[in-house]
Amino acid sequence: NAGVTQTPKFQVLKTGQSMTLQCAQDMNHNSMYWYRQDPGMGLRLIYYSASEGTTDKGEVPNGYNVSRLNKREFSLRLESAAPSQTSVYFCASSEGVAGAADTQYFGPGTRLTVL
Amino acid sequence: AQSVTQLDSQVPVFEEAPVELRCNYSSSVSVYLFWYVQYPNQGLQLLLKYLSGSTLVKGINGFEAEFNKSQTSFHLRKPSVHISDTAEYFCAVGLDTGRRALTFGSGTRLQVQP
């Protein structure tokens, strides 16, 4: 099992460009999450999907959109990138059967720089 | 709203010494508590978690943590660290309300020196 995979690993964008970060999991998990990690701030939740067909905003959703394409895949889109979105982005998944008690499994991250 | 405070941003320690990484939380409802570890250039992985029951929780790689409800703390300990424990450690809290999202602390960088 590959677990949680993310593409790309690195990306450099210019201000105003758009891009989609891809995430897939092969653990048959119901819930998926997108976080951003900034120095000294830990991880902050952008969006999550409790189950296929549902998405909810997290702590820092502005400037992002998400799509739960199917049970395996959960993408994050930046429509018009800004330097403030320079960060490391992590996708995670969980079984989705025990709410916040579930263990979350993380991908390796995407390092995004917006110039 | 819940919050998590990790009191130390960096903890330098010598190999084979004991270590404690501190975590305090605030919440008005029952919580679940987690410690995750992030090795350089990798994603996070679960070290241990407290859901209910015994307040002393044992995790992987010889780590353990103790839930103290009166002090709203969940400190992580290891009696003897190795060079390979060098990593960033995150404390996280989830609420017993059905909402799945976790709130993470800002992280503690453990640097084990030979």
Image: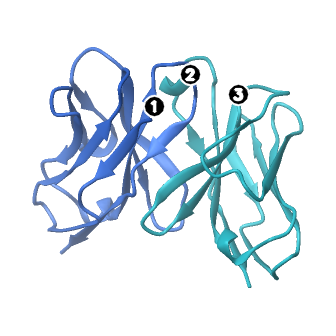
Chain colours: A cyan, B blue
Q: Nearer the viewer, residue B101 or B20?
A: B101
Answer left or right for B112 relative to B60: left
Residue type for callout 2: Gly
| Residue A99: image tag | 2
Q: How would you rate the neighbour count of disc 3 (Cα within 10 Å): few for under 14, some for 14-19, many for 20 or more?
A: many
| Residue A50: image tag | 3
Answer left or right for B64 relative to A77: left
Question: As displayed, is residue A107 above or below residue B47?
Answer: below
Answer left or right for B91 relative to A87: left
Q: Residue at x 30, y 59 (%)?
A: B85
Q: Do labels 3 and 2 touch, CB within 8 Å?
A: no
Answer left or right for B46 relative to A45: left
Q: Nearer the viewer, residue A4 or B8?
A: B8
The residues bearing labels 3 and 1 have C-alpha atoms spaced at a distance of: 14 Å
Residue type for callout 1: Gly
| Residue B94: image tag | 1
x then y, percent, for residue B7: 24, 56
Q: Chain of mark 2?
A: A
Query: Which quadrant is home to the N terminus of chain A?
Result: top right
The residues bearing labels 2 and 1 have C-alpha atoms spaced at a distance of: 9 Å
x then y, percent, for residue B107: 37, 58
Q: Residue at x 30, y 39 (%)?
A: B25
Residue type for callout 3: Ala
x then y, percent, for residue A110: 68, 64
Residue A94 position by quadrant: top right
Q: Chain of mark 3?
A: A
Q: Secondary structure at mark 2?
A: helix
The residues bearing labels 3 and 2 have C-alpha atoms spaced at a distance of: 9 Å
Q: Nearer the viewer, residue B74 or A24?
A: B74
Query: Which quadrant is home to the C terminus of chain A?
Result: bottom right
* Residues behind callouts 3 and 1 on a single chain: no
Q: Do labels 2 and 1 touch, CB within 8 Å?
A: yes
